[in-house]
Amino acid sequence: MNKLLVTVWDGLRDKHVVAALRARSFVDVTFTTPMIFFTHHRLVTRPMIRTNMDAAEAFIVDELAPLDVIGSKPAPTQQSIKVRVFAGLRAAGFDVAGLEAAYAAWWEGASDAKGLSDGIAEAWEEATKKETWAYVSAFLHAAAGPMLATHRRNLDKDCIGISELEYAPITTDYVESGFAHLDLVTRTLVGAGMDACIGVAHASILKAFDTDGTRRAAAIAAVRRSRRSTGASSSGAAVDEAEVDAKVDEFRVTSFFNLPKEERWVIIRDLQKRYQKDIVEASRDALKAEAGARLARLRLKKDEHIRLCAMRCDKYNDFVKVVPCRTVADLEALCARHADDLKACAEALRDQIRVRLHV
């Protein structure tokens, strides 16, 4: 256990891991969180969705993709998505006064509820610190392509052909969105396989190992998030205990501790027996397969380069014997030698071109 803790701690102290976490936080506060509002709020109608999703794609293409690996370009602002969405909605002819007021209340908060702006501003400033921005910028630049592919994949295929719904978003996996920046660094620096990461992440989402107190706190947070997504006040306001109890019961269904003690011991013993085969050996085999595939690609690339060099050598040997025409008189003499055979003359002229390409 101590060795595991030391390994994880060493990984979390690495500047690249910290930069990956900051990049993930940056995407959360500048892209994911605002888009949750613009795809779930009750004032956002279905015809608006296409414009909102176009704004999201433009943010990835125009603001994340142009970032570089040395941090020379400034970070997108906290309000980039908001500005793009409302500009697009106005251009499309929608009345956005009510939606703007709802967004302002959601962002800045109301008299009885705290808004999101303080927390988002703090996270944005942490992610864009000058001393680490170069690393974060590099992660965001690299993630722009996969983010765009995921964004386009999450468009509802069943709505293609219906102009108002063509870009409707579909529900995606919350766990999936957390892996874009971390899969490489966890494997390289911490030594944890992606299967382990996926298992831990899903267990966390399912609240499988939460205590009663943690489960209730998560239920309260979930109820408040649900209120906030509908435009109602949440932070600081009292929550409905009945809703919280219902959410706790929902979380308890997937709790490991909800199983009888005998069944829990059966699972634990089975995991202990199969750990070496299913975890250690499987991870080792996966690494070997990954390394083997990488080696095969390198060999293929090397073989292709050798074939290219051999082809160039053959071309050189074929045309090094051709005497190039250096003057107009030489060219006229060449044509005169083949005056009786137009095909041979054309081939001789082609050889003059080839000798310049290959010799």
Image (tube, helix red, strand yellow):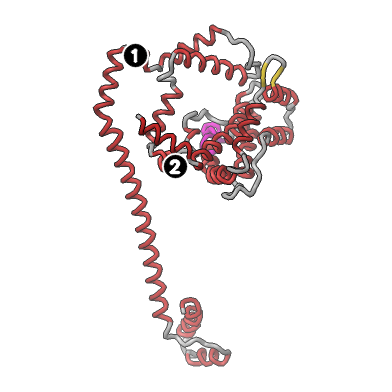
Count of marks overlaid on the render: 2
Residue 57 seen in the current view: yes
Within 10 angstroms of label 1, few (less than 14), some, or many (20 or more) residues? few
Residue at horizontal 72%, vertical 26%? 100
Front-lying residue, 316 or 132: 132
Front-lying residue, 18 or 260: 18
Q: Magenta-highlighted stretch: main secondary structure? A: helix
Front-lying residue, 57 or 6: 6
Residue 114, given in percent of the width and then of the height, sits at 67, 19
Pointer 1: what residue?
259
- CA–CA distance in space, label 1 to label 2: 35 Å
Residue at horizontal 59%, vertical 16%? 224
Residue 291, given in percent of the width and then of the height, sits at 34, 48
Asked whether, in this view, residue 157 is left or right of residue 115, the answer is: left
Q: Is residue 159 magenta?
A: yes
Which quadrant of the view contains residue 192? Answer: top left
Tell me the quarter of the image containing the N terminus.
top left
Dot 1 or dot 2: first in sequence order is 2
Q: Is residue 64 magenta?
A: no
Residue 141, given in percent of the width and then of the height, sits at 56, 45
Residue at horizontal 32%, vertical 41%? 286
Which quadrant of the view contains residue 45? Answer: top right
Residue at horizontal 66%, vertical 30%? 48
Q: Which mark is residue 46?
A: none
> Marks 1 and 2: CB-CB under 8 Å?
no
Which residue extends farthest left? Answer: 273
Q: Which mark is residue 184?
A: 2
Residue 166 seen in the current view: no
In magenta, the rendered stretch is: 151-160
- Residue type indicated by callout 1: Leu
Front-lying residue, 256 or 247: 256
Within 10 angstroms of label 2, few (less than 14), some, or many (20 or more) residues? some
